Image (cartoon, grey):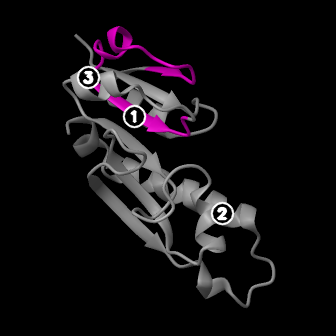
Amino acid sequence: MKKKCLFLGYNSKQTKIIEKINSLGWIVDQTNKSITYNQSKKYHSIICFGYQKIIDKEIIQKIKIPIINLHIGYLPFNRGAHPNFWSFVENTPSGVTIHELNKGIDTGPIIFQKILDFNVYGNNKKLKFSNTYNTLINEIERLFISNLKKLLNF
C-alpha cells in the first residue's frame, strides 16, 4: 500500500515539493479547503505550505502524526501572516522555519530553520521586496527537499 500525504496550501504549479514527494512513491492529495478530522486521519503525513486557514484544534490533538508547517519567517519572530513584511517593518531576523503544528499560531516545536541576512544587500538598490519573498520561498523548498525523507517519516 502506498503512503499518502495531504498537502495543504500551494498546488503543484506553485511549489516543486509536491512533485518531490510523488517521486518517492507517495500519493499526494492537495487542497486549499478546510479539512475535518475524519479526512485527515487517512494520511501518513500532512504538510502545510501556503495554507491560509487555521487547522482545527481537534485535528491537532487527535491525529496520530505530526502536522508539518513550512513558514517563511524565522521563528519565533514574525508568527502568522506576512512574516517577510514584518521582519522588515520590525527589524527582526529573516529566514525560514519548518515546524510541527500545535494549538498556537507558529508556536510548535522547530524541526529545521535557516536564517537569511537580507541586510547584506543594503546597498543594492535593485533588491525589491518581491525578491526577498521569492528567496524565502526558494530557501524553504530547498530546506524541505534536502530533509524530505526525515520529514515524511517524522
Residue 25 makes an appearance in the image = no
Amino acid type assigned to the residue bearing label 2 in the image: Phe
Image check: 129 left or right of 18? right
- Which mark's residue is nearer the viewer, 2 or 3? 2
Q: Quadrant of residue 148?
A: top left
Residue 84 makes an appearance in the image = yes
Provide residue 8's location: percent of width, then percent of height. Answer: 48, 29
N-term mark: 1 or 2 = 1
Provide residue 27's location: percent of width, then percent of height. Answer: 38, 18
Number of other residues with Cα within 10 Å of mark 1, as a class: few under 14, some 14 to 19, many 20 or more? many
- Which mark's residue is nearer the viewer, 1 or 2? 2
Image check: 60 left or right of 118? left
Q: Are marks 2 and 3 in contact (CB under 8 Å)?
A: no
Q: Quadrant of residue 102?
A: top left
Image check: 124 left or right of 63? right
Q: Secondary structure at mark 2?
A: helix
Residue at point 34%, 28% (across, down): 57
Seen from the viewer's position, the closer of residues 29 and 87 is 87
Residue at point 27%, 15% (across, down): 2
N-term mark: 2 or 3 = 3
Amino acid type assigned to the residue bearing label 1 in the image: Ile
Q: Quadrant of residue 133?
A: bottom right
- In the rendered image, which residue does mark 2 sit on? 85
- In the rendered image, which residue does mark 3 sit on? 44
Rounded to the nearest angstrom, the CA distance separating label 1 from label 2 is 23 Å
Q: Is residue 4 above or below residue 110?
A: above
Q: How many marks?
A: 3
Amino acid type assigned to the residue bearing label 3 in the image: His
What is the magenta range? 29-51
- In the rendered image, which residue does mark 1 sit on? 47
Q: Is residue 90 above or below residue 38?
A: below
Seen from the viewer's position, the closer of residues 83 and 150 is 83
